[in-house]
Amino acid sequence: MERRTFLQTGLLAASFSLEHKYLRYRREEAPFIVNAGTGGNNTADLLARMEKDCLSHKPDLTILMIGTNDMNSRKHIPLPQYEKNLRQIVSAIRKTGSRLLMITILPGYEPYLYTRHPQAFYAPEGYQARNKAVNDVIRKIADAEKQPLLDMHHVFEAVGNIGVAPDSLLQNEANSGKTDGIHPTPEGYRLMATVIYDCIIQRELPHKRVVCFGDSITFGDGGLEGRSYPAYLKKLFAY
């Protein structure tokens, strides 16, 4: 069975086969979902716009995924400062009473990354170790704050077929005409939304007012109407 068929008929169909599980949590009032992702953002950018783009919506659930630009872009932030920034973001959101769903950052396809940055950019630890260190910080803070963690890195590493094949869940030359290796394909975003939706339902997290806060991986391709995990999440909630 091809990977696309597996994702569509395996994960998605299995998830929705338990229809009563979802209907238990359907609300008369549709949830309010905001896509507060902005391309190129790191933790410093999120701190600067947090009040306007996240807290002002008074979310009961904030889905937080940030760190890819902190470790990969010209806006690189050293790990100790990343941890300090992330703790400040989490603390400010928690003070409003919002629950948090913290998400680990995705794996990347290294050969494409090295077309944008020399390997020395990731020295001395290397790309894989830097990615792991960022995700370890996310896990540590989620545990300390007793907030749920969703390991999206593991999901994509396990079933994302990261590489150059057309069925990779990250954009590449075969499936999008890009040497990207960081951003999900539409099918990747659908997978993200389904896994997030399942996590929210299974953990009975509040979801009347949801803010998805992050960078371009949150924004996706089209905000709330195009191909992004918040857009697909909106459809799953029948908003």
Image (tube, rainbow, N blue to C red):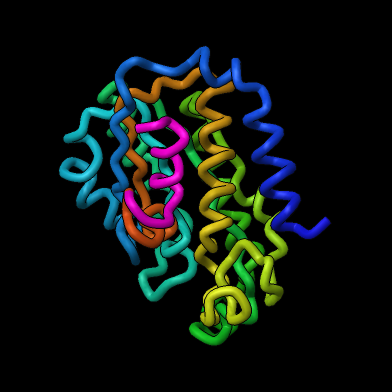
Q: Does the magenta stretch include residue 112?
A: no
Answer above or below: position of 136 versus 239.
below
Q: In this view, does 25 lie to the left or right of 15?
A: left
Residue at left 65%, top 54%?
Answer: 156
Residue 143 seen in render = no
- The picture places residue 174, in percent across and down from the top left corner, at 62, 79
Image quadrant occupied by the C terminus: top left
Q: Which segment did they paint magenta?
A: 225-239
- The picture places residue 15, in percent across and down from the top left corner, at 65, 32
Q: Residue furthest top?
A: 24
Residue at left 46%, top 21%?
Answer: 205
Numbered-mark total: 0
Which residue occupies the foreground of this view, 67 or 165?
Answer: 165
Answer above or below: position of 202 versus 37.
above
- The picture places residue 196, in percent across and down from the top left corner, at 53, 37
Residue at left 56%, top 40%?
Answer: 194
Image quadrant occupied by the N terminus: bottom right
Q: In this view, does 105 lie to the left or right of 32?
A: right
- The picture places residue 81, in percent across and down from the top left corner, at 39, 55
Question: Residue 166 is drawn in which quadrant?
Answer: bottom right
Residue at left 31%, top 36%?
Answer: 33
Question: Residue 163 is drawn in which quadrant?
Answer: bottom right
Q: Does the magenta stretch include residue 230?
A: yes
Which residue occupies the foreground of this view, 67 or 33?
Answer: 33
Residue 129 seen in render = yes
